[in-house]
């Protein structure tokens, strides 16, 4: 008579939890932790600063030169900084007379606005952004409080002056239109609010336009 070769089911043995009252036990952490080095300050030892190195005099002279350059910075009659040293970079500026253009447009009527931009630097502004914003009047509202109404991208060579026409749709009856010119890489706009005097900005207020 052949014996049954099928495997017999094994009984599940329950392991008893280690430790007292069934709680797991952990190794002692002190066996694996190294001793902390003594603190010279708490121990009363005096801490000496490092000795001046060979670069300390040059760094000190550079800081003094930068401080002197900042003090001798001049401003024009409008309070804008005057660039005294020519560097190989664009130096963008803008002016406008687009008041008559925006008064001729009704609210939500598509149109266009022109203003003048130029490059006084010694290097081309290959990616020159010319933008128009519309927002509340005054000079204290951040740029985030204004809405972009039009944008065009041009190139301005050193000494080049150009009248740029930008698409424009007026949305307000009363407010302020702001034209901005900048190169995001070579001459980025360096302000957080739409200031009254900034070489990247030109603006006009308008009131009670129907």
Image: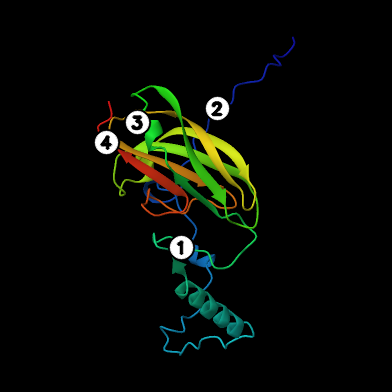
Q: Secondary structure under badge 1?
A: strand
**Circle 4 is placed at which residue position?**
207
Residue 125 pos. (x, y %): 62, 48
Residue that lies at the very extreme toward the left in this rendered image: 208
> Residue 103 bears which disc, if any?
3
Q: Give the number of the mark in front: 1 or 2.
A: 1
> Residue 11 bears which disc, if any?
2
Task: Measure the C-alpha gap from mark 3 to mark 2.
Answer: 94 Å
Q: Nearer the viewer, residue 165 or 29?
A: 165
Residue at image point 34% right, 24% down: 106
Residue at image point 52% right, 64% down: 83
Q: Nearer the viewer, residue 189 or 119?
A: 119
Q: Give the number of the mark in front: 3 or 2.
A: 3
Q: Give the number of the mark in front: 3 or 1.
A: 3
Q: Residues within 10 Å of mark 4 (few under 14, many from 20)?
A: few
Residue at image point 44% right, 43% down: 96
Q: Give the number of the mark in front: 4 or 2.
A: 4
Q: Is residue 119 above or below residue 172?
A: below
Q: Secondary structure under badge 3?
A: helix
Q: Are marks 4 and 2 in contact (CB under 8 Å)?
A: no
- Pointer 1 or 2: first along the chain: 2
Task: Measure the C-alpha gap from mark 3 to mark 1.
Answer: 32 Å
**Circle 1 is placed at which residue position?**
81
- Pointer 4 or 2: first along the chain: 2
Residue 178 pos. (x, y %): 40, 41
Q: Is residue 104 above or below residue 131?
A: above
Question: In which quarter of the view is residue 162 placed?
Answer: top right
* Left or right: residue 155 compared with residue 165: right
Q: Residues within 10 Å of mark 2 (few under 14, many from 20)?
A: few
């Amino acid at each position: 008579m052949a014996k049954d070769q099928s495997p017999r089911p094994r009984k599940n043995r329950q392991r008893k939890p280690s430790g007292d009252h069934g709680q797991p036990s952990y190794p002692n952490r002190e066996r694996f932790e190294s001793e902390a080095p003594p603190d010279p300050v708490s121990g009363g030892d005096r801490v000496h600063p490092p000795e001046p190195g060979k670069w300390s005099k040059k760094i000190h002279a550079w800081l003094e030169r930068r401080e002197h350059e900042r003090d001798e910075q001049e401003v024009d009659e409008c309070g804008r900084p005057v660039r005294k040293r020519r560097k190989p970079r664009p130096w963008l500026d803008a002016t406008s007379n687009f008041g008559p253009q925006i008064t001729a447009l009704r609210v939500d009527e598509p149109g266009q606005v022109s203003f003048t931009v130029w490059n006084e630097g010694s290097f081309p502004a290959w990616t020159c952004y010319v933008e128009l914003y519309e927002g509340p009047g005054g000079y204290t509202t951040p740029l985030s409080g204004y809405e972009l109404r039009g944008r065009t991208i041009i190139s301005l060579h050193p000494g080049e002056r150009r009248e740029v026409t930008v698409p424009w749709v007026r949305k307000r009856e009363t407010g302020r239109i702001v034209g901005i010119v900048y190169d995001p890489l070579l001459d980025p706009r360096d302000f957080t609010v739409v200031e009254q005097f900034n070489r990247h900005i030109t603006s006009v207020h308008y009131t009670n336009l129907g």
